[in-house]
Image (cartoon, helix red, strand yellow):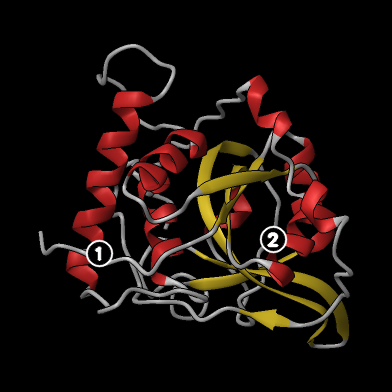
Amino acid sequence: MENRTLDWVAEFDPKSKEYPIRTLLSQRNVEDRFIMWGEGVVTDQGAEGACVGFAWMNELLAAPLPPVEEPTSDTANGIARSYYQEAKKIDQWHGEDYEGTSVLAGAKVIKSKGYIEEYRWCYNVEDIKGAIISEGPVVLGIPWYEGMYRTTQDALVSVSGKKVGGHAILVTGYNPHMVFGSETLEVFRWRNSWGSGYGHNGSGWIKSKDLQMLMKEGGEACVPMQRTRPIFEKI
């Protein structure tokens, strides 16, 4: 896993502050509970730094509104790469001769295709938890540490070692009381784009306190709103 390219780059638009998810969550009585949204086929970005395209592709593959017809992994990988290239054309950085892009640029691409009508933002773990429980999966862009390349046998992530870059990944679940050996932990589930060899069939768990730390270090979390079931063309 250590040969994976990490190329999420933060892009904070001041306008995003006008669209926090907590405004909507405050109007609802969201209670803590276990939830795990269905995940689609396993994707694999290979060594290419296209994680933003893949994180958004994984979101489109997941419940609550999965595709009308689920694509093969190869087709999903091809579509994800095309989303990444489109995002690079509209992000804040000049030209396209660089690796990586932002979650925001990916959100704009997905919205332009009509798969979502809007997107909102989480600014801490409580926002992410509320969004997961009441809306569905959340697309993250976060700092990545050496220890996060691999998981334990229980698919638990260790945020340890040196910071090595930034990665985009999809949060698909939440468990307030999950047992790992002799410990009971509050955790989030996430879907990676590094093939089935990562965690359990491409997915892992991260402690709530570790995710909060990553958010404080400049992470971004985008909530797709008013989804529609995608219909993919074959690539």
Q: Quadrant of residue 183?
A: bottom right
Residue 191: give x, y in percent of width and height.
51, 67
Circle nearer the N terminus (1, 2): 1
Question: Hey, which residue is sitting farthest left in the picture?
Answer: 235
Q: Position of residue 71 (x, y in %)?
A: 22, 74
**What is the quadrant of the N terminus in the image?**
bottom left
What's the amino acid at mark 1?
A: Ala
Choose mark 1 or mark 2, whichever is in front. 1
Q: Which residue is mark 2?
A: 158
Quadrant position of residue 76 = bottom left
Instruction: Indicate left or right for 89 with 158 as reference.
Output: left
- The residue positioned 85% from the left and 65% from the top of the image is 28
Looking at the image, is 177 positioned above or below residue 90? below
Inspect the image, locate mark 2, and give the three-letter code of the amino acid beneath it. Ser
What label sits on residue 76 in the rendered view? 1
In 3D space, how far apart are the residues under numbered discs 1 and 2 (Cα atoms)?
Answer: 28 Å
**Which residue is rendered at x = 76% and y = 83% of the image?**
34
The residue that appears at 88% across and 75% down in the rendered structure is 31
Left or right of 86, for residue 196: right
Q: Residues within 10 Å of mark 2 (few under 14, many from 20)?
A: some
Horizontal relation, residue 171 to residue 56: left or right: right
Looking at the picture, tell me which residue is in the foreground, 69 or 47: 69
